[in-house]
Amino acid sequence: MRINTLSAVDDYRGCGAAWAALDNHNEIIALRYMSECPTDRSNQPRWVQSIARTANGLDGLNLPTCSGSTALSKIGKAANSCKDCPTPPRRAAYRPSELLAMARDLIESSDLDQWTAYRAKCRDELAELGRVVSGRCSCYQFVQNN
């Protein structure tokens, strides 16, 4: 489907996965990109934020990663210096690798919650304009998923 209506052209931001609102003639009247989901990680516990700051890398989902024992040690010290850092029931502290895994799980869960809310908001906005379909944008064309 060509993206040629003025309102859809204004929404067009290049290639990417998106949702589109179609009118009665199957013309695209609006677009919302899946990649434009705003993520706010400032509401995470302090120990999770300290791990995210101290980590020496990010994976494909922008979750903190760590390579090497020195970096893991720094992560452990940063997290354990926070008052809200969890402690296991039978040990003095969690291992740095355990803290990193726990922080990644919390961040991923929070990101998923934000994505779910963004998805619902976009689909509701588009549903008010027309029939909602999902697909991909490329070169002023929208290809609907089957």
Image (tube, rainbow, N blue to C red):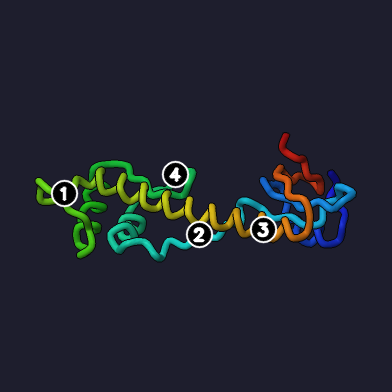
Instruction: State which tag comes first along the sequence, 1 or 3.
Output: 1
Residue that numbered label 4 is attached to:
59
Q: CA distance from mark 1 to mark 4?
A: 27 Å
Q: Amino acid at mark 3?
A: Asp
SS for tag 1?
Answer: loop
Q: Point out the image quarter for the N terminus.
A: top right
Mark 1 residue type: Pro
Circle 3 SS class:
helix
Choose mark 4 or mark 2, whichever is in front. Answer: 2
Q: Position of residue 63 (x, y in %)?
A: 42, 49
**Residue at horizontal 86%, vertical 61%?**
6
Apparent side of residue 14 relative to residue 92 in the rendered image (left or right): right
Image location (x, y in percent) of residue 24: 87, 51
Gap in Å between the C-alphas at discs 2 and 3? 19 Å
Look at discs 1 and 2 and give the one toward the viewer.
1
Which of 83/97 is in front?
Answer: 83
Q: CA distance from mark 1 to mark 2?
A: 29 Å
